[in-house]
Image (tube, grey):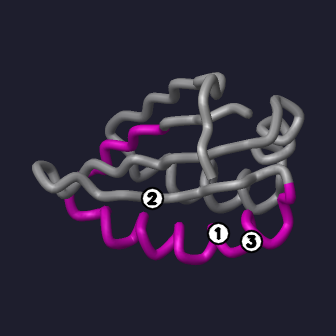
Amino acid sequence: MISAIVKYTVVPGNVDTVIELFREVVPQILANEPGCLRYEISRSQGDLNVLIINELYVDSDALATHRSTPYAEAIVQGKIWPLLADRSVELFDTVITQN
């Protein structure tokens, strides 16, 4: 499995818009991507303009599929990314898991 930890620093004044856009896209991700096992968004307690997206995929093909979906391109890349001051992505291979 592959985990993606994505950090978004949102331009001040836009975080509520970004969260609402995620409310629109996350159900589509979970309904249409069987290879996506988790898509969780958390907000920093210390800086309310910072979001962490914790994603889990069965393999690299599932991650590639996610990145190329119409809703990821239209909403995430097209509407959310322009509202960001910074964005970083780090990928991890699962070494231990517990259900």
Left or right: 39 as drawn, with respect to 7: right
Left or right: 38 as drawn, with respect to 12: right
Q: How many C-alpha atoms fall within 10 Å of the one at disc 2: few (<14), some, or many (≥20)?
A: some
C-beta proximity under 8 Å, tags 3 and 1 = yes
Q: Residue drawn at (74%, 33%), measured in percent from left and top?
A: 1
C-beta proximity under 8 Å, tags 1 and 2 = no
Question: What's the distance in space between the residues labelled 3 and 2, CA to CA?
Answer: 15 Å
Q: Which residues are magenta?
A: 6-34
Q: Dot 2 corresponds to which residue?
A: 41
The residue furthest front is 98
Q: How many C-alpha atoms fall within 10 Å of the one at disc 1: few (<14), some, or many (≥20)?
A: some
Q: Secondary structure at mark 1?
A: helix
The residue furthest left is 46
Task: Give the number of the mark in front: 1 or 2.
Answer: 2
> Could you tell me how many numbered marks the image carries?
3
Magenta-drawn stretch contains 8 = yes
Q: Residue drawn at (35%, 51%), measured in percent from left and top?
A: 51
Q: Residue 87, how many percent across, how many down?
A: 43, 34
Q: Secondary structure at mark 3?
A: helix
Left or right: 93 as drawn, with respect to 22: right
Q: Nearer the viewer, residue 36 or 16?
A: 36
Q: Residue 68, how many percent across, how many down?
A: 83, 44
Q: Dot 3 corresponds to which residue?
A: 28
Task: Give the residue type at disc 2.
Answer: Ile
Q: Dot 1 corresponds to which residue?
A: 25
Q: Residue 61, how many percent across, how many down?
A: 89, 34
Q: Earlier in the sequence, mark 3 or mark 2?
A: 3
Q: Residue drawn at (10%, 50%), measured in percent from left and top?
A: 46
C-beta proximity under 8 Å, tags 3 and 2 = no
Q: Residue 77, how many percent across, how many down?
A: 62, 48
